[in-house]
């Protein structure tokens, strides 16, 4: 999945945020021990932010295998709130598809501006 490295790193950050948030919120209160879970997020921030500029190009060139690999990352998300987990998974999958669709539109418009309004 090297071809979608930057997208994968950004997705890893988002999934880690959701996972940690779901685990911390599971009992309705935040303890000092749970605050330590926030440290799981830190190593994901740098790579995600540094490579964020490459995400649009990756989405534009993403093939079906790469899309399925990213969907598999999303499907592996496990948080205590099952309904929230389902919403997040569906939303992230929709976001990946929408991002690829927007990238396709931009390419089509650049290639034939008179055909695509």
Image (tube, helix red, strand yellow):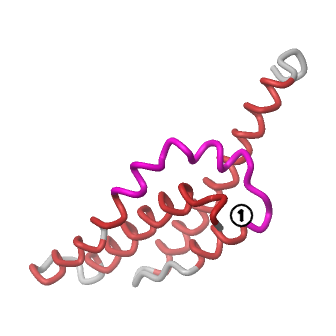
Q: Residue furthest front?
A: 2
The residue sitting at 18% across, 80% down in the picture is 34
Residue 59 on the magenta segment: yes
Residue 69 on the magenta segment: no
Instruction: Pick the residue in front: 38 or 46.
Output: 46
Instruction: Pick the residue in front: 81 or 73.
Output: 73
Q: Residue furthest right?
A: 115
- What's the magenta bit mostly, secondary-structure-wise? helix
The tally of labels here is 1
Q: Which residues are magenta?
A: 46-67
Left or right: residue 1 compared with residue 88: right
Return the residue at label 1: 67
The percent coordinates of residue 15 (x first, y second) are 45, 68
Left or right: residue 14 compared with residue 100: left
Left or right: residue 55 compared with residue 20: right
- Quarter of the N terminus within the rendering: bottom right
Q: Secondary structure at mark 1?
A: helix
The residue sitting at 70% across, 39% down in the picture is 102
The residue sitting at 78% across, 58% down in the picture is 63
Q: For the residue carrying disc 1, how many other residues have a C-alpha within 10 Å: few (<14), some (14-19), or many (20+)?
A: some
- Image height of 92 relative to 113, above or below: below
């Amino acid at each position: 999945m090297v071809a979608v490295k930057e997208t994968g790193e950004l997705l890893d950050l988002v999934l880690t945020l959701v996972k940690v948030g779901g685990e911390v919120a599971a009992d309705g209160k935040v303890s000092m021990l749970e605050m330590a879970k926030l440290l799981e997020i830190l190593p994901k921030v740098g790579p995600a932010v540094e490579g964020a500029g490459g995400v649009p190009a990756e989405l534009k060139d993403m093939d079906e295998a790469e899309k399925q690999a990213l969907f598999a990352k999303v499907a592996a998300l496990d948080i205590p709130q099952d309904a929230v987990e389902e919403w997040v998974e569906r939303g992230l999958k929709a976001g990946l598809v929408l991002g690829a669709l927007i990238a396709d539109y931009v390419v089509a418009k650049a290639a034939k501006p008179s055909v695509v309004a």
